[in-house]
Amino acid sequence: MKVLDREPALAPPADGVAERVANVDWQRVAGDLDAEGSAIVERLITPAECRELAALYAEDARFRSRVVMSRHGFGRGEYKYFAYPLPGLVAGLREAVYPHLAPIANRWNEAMGIAVRFPSEHSLFVERCHAAGQTRPTPLLLQYAAGDYNCLHQDLYGEHVFPLQLVLLLSEPGRDFAGGEFVMTEQRPRMQSRPVVLPLRQGDAAVIAVHHRPVQGTRGMYRVSLRHGVSRVRAGHRHTAGIIFHDAA
């Protein structure tokens, strides 16, 4: 059985997704992640790709499940998990971005005393997930209308968790929606939580810590726990794509 199926990209650009990803300043991304637990990559995908990806929400055959947040106390709004085979743009980003994040993930685990190490290629990590029974794809599309929001959470789906993920804003703030800021909190030991608001525009990607990250303190390295969510949308409609690198049990 194939681990990953591929399709043509939704909106092939003049330069491919892999080339665009390769041109990102990953040293700067790594520095921002070490300092803040998040990093912004501006204009990673085009407006046309944003529109075509958001339009897939209406195509139920593309997805394995739909979640209405209010039914589970997750907030308001809804999201759908893609089924395999993933859309070409989603699969392409998953495969192209992962090798740049794996060294950061391994360095973080070493700093936090976690024995797990991640392979250099995403397909090998997905094989590890599937061998452990985590076979359901986790990339998703989220849809918000006025009054909707997403409670602070962590995207943990099984024993094998890749500690970084990608969030793509598919709508344009101020034109398509108002409010709906992407927010994170960092829970530090014996301290109050630190809030962070990431100022994303259409096509921007946020690289964020899924669960925790290492921080250098005066007495050595310690872990901080992070959560992310979306503030209340005041008007319009907001679409987001989440690119999670581990599969679900």
Image (cartoon, helix red, strand yellow):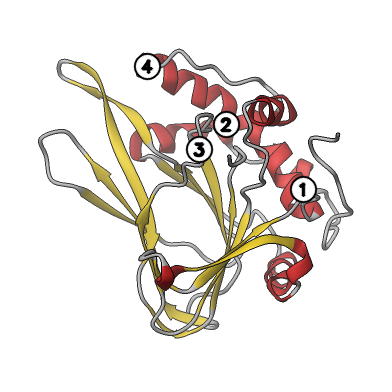
- The kind of secondary structure element at disc 1 is helix
Q: Which of the marked residues, 3 or 1, is nearer the chain's N terminus?
A: 1
- Residue wearing tag 1: 17
Q: Are marks 4 and 2 in contact (CB under 8 Å)?
A: no
- Residue wearing tag 4: 111
Number of residues whose C-alpha sits closer than 10 Å to that of mark 2, classed few (under 14), some (14–19) or many (20 or more) = many
Q: Which of the marked residues, 4 or 2, is nearer the chain's N terminus?
A: 2
Image quadrant where one finds the N terminus: top right
At label 2, the amino acid type is Leu
Image quadrant where one finds the C terminus: top right
Residue 239 picture location, percent across and down: 57, 71
Distance between the alpha carbons at the discs numbered 4 and 2:
15 Å
Q: Are marks 2 and 3 in contact (CB under 8 Å)?
A: yes
Residue 26 picture location, percent across and down: 57, 34
**Closer to the camera, 233 or 246?**
246
- Residue wearing tag 3: 164
Number of residues whose C-alpha sits closer than 10 Å to that of mark 4, classed few (under 14), some (14–19) or many (20 or more) = some
- The kind of secondary structure element at disc 4 is helix
Looking at the picture, does residue 165 appear above or below residue 68? above
Distance between the alpha carbons at the discs numbered 1 and 4:
31 Å
- The kind of secondary structure element at disc 2 is helix
Q: Which of the marked residues, 1 or 2, is nearer the chain's N terminus?
A: 1
Numbered tag placed on residue 179 in the rendering = none
Numbered tag placed on residue 101 in the rendering = 2
At label 4, the amino acid type is Ala
- Residue located 77% across and 41% down the image: 18
